[in-house]
Each structure stands twice: as structure tokens, then as C-alpha cells.
Amino acid sequence: MSELDSALVFLKTGGSIVLVNWIISWGLEDLPWWHNMASKTRQILSLGFASLVGLLAYELSINPGLLETVEPFAKVLLAVGGSWYAQQLLHEKNPNRKQ
């Protein structure tokens, strides 16, 4: 199983909600307009985007032609995203980091 296949399985089996909520937490939590939305609206957007990501992952997994087209780009995004995340973790654990 390739990295992309593993990522698609993760996203299809509930990982999409983890990914979307991480993106929301990291990217939107500091923005005032996000907090000005009603809590229910934020929940619906989170579930909607997570469902969309899961359905797109499913569509990629059942459509080999589309998967072949997307795979080179997805591998680059997975590598960059994984490397960036690892760097963030290392930066957080650095004992010489200034608080």
C-alpha cells in the first residue's frame, strides 16, 4: 500500500474530521470573524468540509484514472505537509526555544 493509499484510507474512515478540525484549529481560531459565527454554524461547516474531504478521498480510491492523475501532486503535498508538521513538533520540543 502506497503513502497515498494509506492517506485515502485514513481520510475515508474518519480521518477527514481530524484533518479538517486541525486545519480549523491552526488556521481559523485566531481570526475574529470565525469566532463571530454562531457555534452551530462552525460545527456545520466543520462537518460539511470533513464530509467533502472524505467523499473526495473515496472517489479517488475508486477511480484509478483520477488517482493516477492526482498521485504525483498528492505525494508532493503529503511530503511537504508531513515535513512541515515534523518541523513544528521538533520546534515545540526544542529545549533552547525561547518562550
Image (cartoon, grey):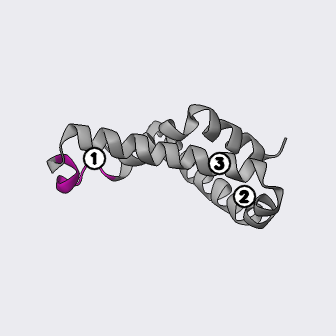
Is label 1 in a helix, a strand or a loop? loop
The answer to whether residue 8 of the structure is visible from this angle is: yes
Task: Report the Cα–Cα distance between label 2 and label 1.
Answer: 28 Å
Labels 3 and 1: the sequence-earlier one: 1
Which residue is disc 1 drawn over?
A: 29
Question: How many neighbours does mark 1 have within 10 angstroms: few (below 14), some (14-19), or many (20 or more)?
Answer: few
Could you tell me which quadrant the N terminus lies in?
top right
Question: How many neighbours does mark 3 have within 10 angstroms: few (below 14), some (14-19), or many (20 or more)?
Answer: many
Labels 2 and 1: the sequence-earlier one: 1
Q: Amino acid at mark 1?
A: Glu
* Position in image of residue 2 (x %, y %): 82, 46
Magenta residue check for 77: no
2 and 1 marks in contact (CB < 8 Å): no
Is label 2 in a helix, a strand or a loop? helix
Q: Amino acid at mark 2?
A: Lys
* Position in image of residue 99 (x %, y %): 30, 42
Task: Report the Cα–Cα distance between label 3 and label 1.
Answer: 26 Å
Is label 3 in a helix, a strand or a loop? helix
Task: Report the Cα–Cα distance between label 3 and label 2.
Answer: 14 Å
Magenta-drawn segment:
28-35
The answer to whether residue 6 is above or below residue 4 is above
| Residue located 38% across and 43% down the image | 46
Q: Residue furthest top?
A: 13
| Residue located 72% across and 58% down the image | 75
* Position in image of residue 89 (x %, y %): 51, 41
Q: Nearer the viewer, mark 3 or mark 1?
A: 3
Is 43 left or right of 90, judged from the image as shown? left
Which residue is disc 2 drawn over?
A: 75
Residue 57 disc label: 3
Labels 3 and 2: the sequence-earlier one: 3
| Residue located 57% across and 36% down the image | 15
Residue 40 disc label: none
